[in-house]
């Protein structure tokens, strides 16, 4: 896990996730998201500025919001369009690709400038 519940409440200022157990459960799911975005470099990153922890908190909170939305909508999705004459409703659900894009965008806000998002080959410093 890249962040603790204390990081979430005190540093990130999170209020949405009500308890530590729920945060920890979702932060474990946020870890692989961050690992994928950083090409596995997050595991060895020295997070002196707390940017990785903030990214983890943001992704964890988004995962919580997504679960809450699913519970609230209970399979019916959010209304994409509605017609009154001969009543018709079309529901929209958030797909995996859309959620992944939202998670990546949130993480990138905090990880920008850390080098964790770099996709190239690191420069050799010694020959």
Image (tube, rainbow, N blue to C red):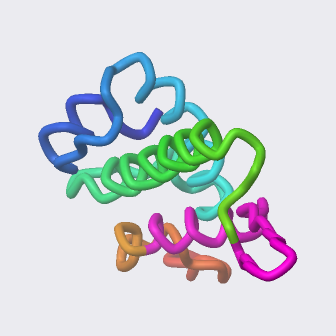
Residue 44 place in picture, x, y as percent: 49, 46
Is 82 magenta? The answer is yes
Front-lying residue, 41 or 11: 11
- 28 sits to left or right of 91: left
- The foreground one among 122 and 83 is 83
* Farthest-out residue, top: 21
Above or below residue 87? Residue 47 is above
Bounds of the magenta segment: 80-108
State the image quarter where residue 93 is shown: bottom right
- Residue located 86% across and 76% down the image: 86
x then y, percent, for residue 12? 21, 50
Q: Residue furthest left?
A: 10
Q: Position of residue 81 (x, y in %)?
A: 72, 79
In the rendered image, residue 47 lying in the magenta stretch gets the answer no
Query: Residue at 83% across / 72% down in the picture?
Result: 88
Position of residue 3 in the picture relative to residue 48 (left or right): right
Q: Nearer the viewer, residue 67 or 35?
A: 67
When asked about the image quadrant of residue 102, the answer is bottom right
Q: Residue at x 56, y 42 (%)?
A: 31
| Screen quadrant of the C terminus | bottom right
Reply above or below: 8 against 47: above
Foreground pick, 117 / 123: 117
Q: x%, y% of residue 90? A: 81, 70
What number of labels is visible? 0
């Amino acid at each position: 896990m890249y962040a603790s519940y204390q990081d979430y409440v005190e540093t990130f200022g999170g209020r949405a996730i009500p308890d530590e157990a729920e945060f920890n459960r979702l932060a474990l799911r946020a870890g692989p998201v961050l690992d994928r975005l950083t090409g596995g470099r997050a595991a060895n990153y020295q997070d002196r500025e707390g940017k990785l922890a903030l990214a983890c908190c943001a992704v964890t909170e988004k995962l919580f919001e997504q679960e809450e939305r699913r519970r609230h909508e209970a399979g019916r999705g959010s209304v994409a369009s509605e017609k009154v004459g001969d009543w018709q409703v079309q529901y929209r659900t958030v797909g995996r690709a859309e959620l992944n894009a939202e998670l990546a965008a949130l993480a990138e806000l905090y990880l920008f400038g850390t080098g964790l998002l770099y996709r190239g080959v690191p420069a050799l410093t010694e020959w």
